[in-house]
Image: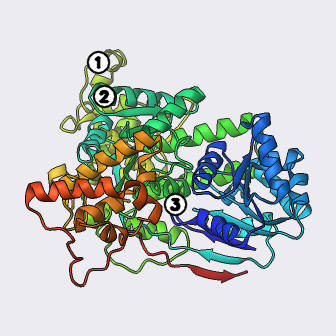
């Protein structure tokens, strides 16, 4: 038995696919989503691997063929869901076929301490009853030590070999900024990643629809994705993104699991995720090809209150155990601390998952790059904000307090006589966005609280300590884009890459993918095209030496890519077969340090 924790794109699928292909016998793979199963089975069968799936989307013919292949011993990999395994005769079919191995994908779903607990996964405690002689292997991308222990217990793993990969993704740049002007901040990211693939995560469906519509109207190739759309609409959006007809998908967290597009150059969160585990998994969809990518999180204090309210209300309606709700609320608090933190983001993530991070400066996050400034006179600003909350008798929300502080003469201010308060207009030099952000920072520091169905601002003991000068307040603000170190104006490609040639090859890849009706990454991944554009191979033999170019792909596509490279070189008088710079070792994937642990 084993527990394998590897980051997104780190090779978990290979861990159960390759042994099944080489060794033989039947491997059962338990997966939470039909889309996940379909993608894997389609990819395997294209490569000639006998794989099937048993799920609710099978028609009678598909089910008959799959079951016949399992009974005959031809099938090596059979995919199914926890519900189908437990509640139908599928388990009997597998047992009769003498299952050799059971692989539990997305194994964190079995733990209520995990970030994506699913009650149906709890039924997998019966795996030993169904398949007493089979080895059981659990796979996940995100699991703290506590979750790892729970997975081992829930699945009754026998003396498992535990392999934990490095949680750091050095090719990702993490930036966590206060949300000041969402549309402007989103466009800033899109404009420096023009024609590149990206995902923008929003908290609510209406936020997804509004942002996707706005971006489309402004000329960005953006599509929405959320659970409120029809299955056909979701499928179309997903296909548009995977096939690179759309550059950006604006989505709720319903999008992403099993997305195989490796060249996602940015992931943006327009609101705070529910947990560091969610954040790690969602940002892990960027840069899966090992090339540089960036992850931007825009947060506000209002996100914390919204998330807590959504979780509490939803769990009460579903009669979820109080312990599970408490665990989720604790994760929200942990995520809030991460957003407000002043520790290197790479270090904070790695430490959260129980690993060490040695570098003093990662040079790849907002903290280490110095993207924010301390606000001068933070204590004075905080006192004015808190005093205003007191003057309006702790009966109003953020926007009303901002209006009073900026000296607004709006009807709702004047009718209540709040234009006569001593705090009216005290901070008129700051924009509404800045003031909202300052208030949210005070909320995050616990120097203000927000409660009620329509959240109002209230004071607490810490508020009075700040107003009396017994406690300091710390406020930060985002530097102007041109003042930020390490700001990218375009995608950060490896040194020596011929960018015009890369774009030519990318267009050719899309043309071939359209002809073959497959996603572009199936033809060649970005890092293969990058190496073609850097080394400009002049023969099929030279092209074959590039990692990711196998015999079949060379036969299918080699001549067309070689012709494109040769045309470009002749037209621009460029050398071919350019050697790797001396002393440079080509790596397209971050190194995975596996830490074996015996339990």
Quarter of the image that includes the N terminus: bottom right
Q: Rounded to the nearest whole Å, what is the CA distance between mark 3 and mark 1?
A: 50 Å
**Location of mark 1 (residue):** 410
Report helix, strand or loop for mark 1: loop
Q: Do the residues labelled 3 and 1 touch (CB within 8 Å)?
A: no
Q: Rounded to the nearest whole Å, what is the CA distance between mark 2 and mark 1?
A: 8 Å
Say whether residue 344 is left or right of residue 233. left
Q: Which residue is drawn at 34% across and 56% down?
A: 294
| First-in-chain label (3 vs 1) | 3
Report helix, strand or loop for mark 3: loop
Q: In this view, does 164 lie above or below 444?
A: below
Say whether residue 213 is left or right of residue 353. left
Q: In this view, does 99 lie above or below 413?
A: below
Q: Are marks 2 and 1 in contact (CB under 8 Å)?
A: yes
**Location of mark 3 (residue):** 8
Specify few, some or many for label 1: CA neighbours under 10 Å numbering under 14, 14-19, or 20 or more: few
């Amino acid at each position: 038995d084993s527990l394998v924790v590897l980051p997104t794109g780190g090779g978990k699928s290979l861990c159960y696919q390759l042994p099944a292909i080489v060794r033989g016998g039947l491997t059962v793979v338990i997966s939470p989503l039909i889309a996940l199963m379909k993608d894997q089975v389609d990819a395997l069968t294209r490569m000639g691997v006998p794989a099937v799936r048993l799920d609710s989307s099978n028609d009678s013919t598909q089910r008959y063929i799959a079951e016949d292949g399992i009974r005959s011993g031809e099938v090596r990999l059979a995919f199914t869901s926890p519900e189908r395994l437990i509640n139908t005769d599928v388990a009997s079919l597998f047992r009769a076929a003498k299952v050799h191995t059971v692989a539990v994908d997305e194994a964190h779903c079995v733990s209520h301490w995990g970030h994506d607990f699913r009650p149906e996964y709890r039924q997998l405690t019966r795996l030993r009853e169904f398949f007493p002689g089979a080895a059981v292997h659990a796979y996940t991308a995100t699991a703290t030590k506590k979750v790892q222990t729970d997975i081992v217990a829930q699945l009754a793993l026998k003396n498992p070999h535990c392999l934990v990969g490095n949680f750091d993704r050095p090719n990702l740049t993490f930036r966590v900024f206060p949300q000041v002007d969402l549309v402007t901040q989103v466009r800033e990211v899109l404009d420096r990643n023009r024609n590149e693939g990206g995902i923008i995560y929003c908290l609510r469906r209406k936020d997804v629809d509004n942002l996707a519509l706005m971006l489309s109207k402004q000329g960005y190739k953006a599509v929405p994705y959320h659970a409120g759309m029809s299955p056909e609409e979701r499928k179309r959006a997903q296909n548009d993104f995977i096939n690179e007809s759309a550059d950006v998908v604006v989505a709720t967290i319903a999008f992403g699991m099993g997305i195989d597009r490796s060249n996602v150059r940015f992931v943006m969160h327009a609101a705070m995720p529910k947990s560091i585990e969610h954040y790690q998994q969602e940002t892990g969809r960027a840069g899966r090809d090992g090339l540089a990518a960036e992850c931007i999180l825009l947060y506000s204090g209002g996100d914390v209150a919204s998330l807590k309210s959504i979780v509490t209300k939803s769990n009460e309606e579903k009669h979820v155990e109080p312990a599970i709700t408490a665990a989720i609320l604790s994760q929200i608090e942990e995520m809030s601390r991460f957003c407000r933190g002043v520790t290197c983001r790479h270090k904070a993530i790695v430490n959260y998952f129980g690993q060490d991070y040695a570098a003093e400066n990662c040079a790849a996050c907002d903290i280490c790059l110095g993207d924010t400034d301390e606000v001068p006179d933070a204590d004075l600003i905080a006192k004015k904000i808190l005093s205003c909350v007191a003057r309006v008798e702790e009966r109003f929300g953020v926007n009303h307090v901002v209006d009073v502080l900026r000296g607004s003469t709006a009807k709702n201010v004047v009718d209540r006589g709040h234009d006569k308060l001593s705090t009216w207009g005290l901070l008129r030099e700051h924009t509404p966005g800045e003031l909202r952000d300052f208030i949210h920072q005070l909320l995050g520091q616990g120097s203000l609280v927000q409660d009620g169905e329509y959240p109002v601002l209230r004071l607490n003991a810490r508020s009075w300590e700040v107003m009396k000068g017994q406690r300091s307040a710390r406020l930060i603000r985002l530097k102007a884009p041109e003042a930020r170190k390490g700001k990218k104006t375009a995608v950060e490609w490896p040194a020596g890459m011929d960018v015009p040639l890369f774009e030519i090859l990318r267009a050719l890849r899309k043309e071939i993918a359209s002809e073959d009706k497959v996603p572009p990454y199936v033809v060649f991944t970005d890092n293969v095209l990058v190496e073609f554009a850097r080394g400009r191979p002049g023969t099929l033999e030279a092209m074959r030496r590039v990692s990711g170019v196998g015999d079949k792909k060379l036969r299918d596509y080699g001549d067309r890519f070689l012709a494109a490279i040769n045309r470009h070189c002749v037209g621009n008088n460029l050398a071919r077969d350019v050697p790797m710079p001396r002393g440079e070792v080509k790596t397209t994937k971050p190194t995975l340090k596996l830490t074996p642990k015996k339990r």
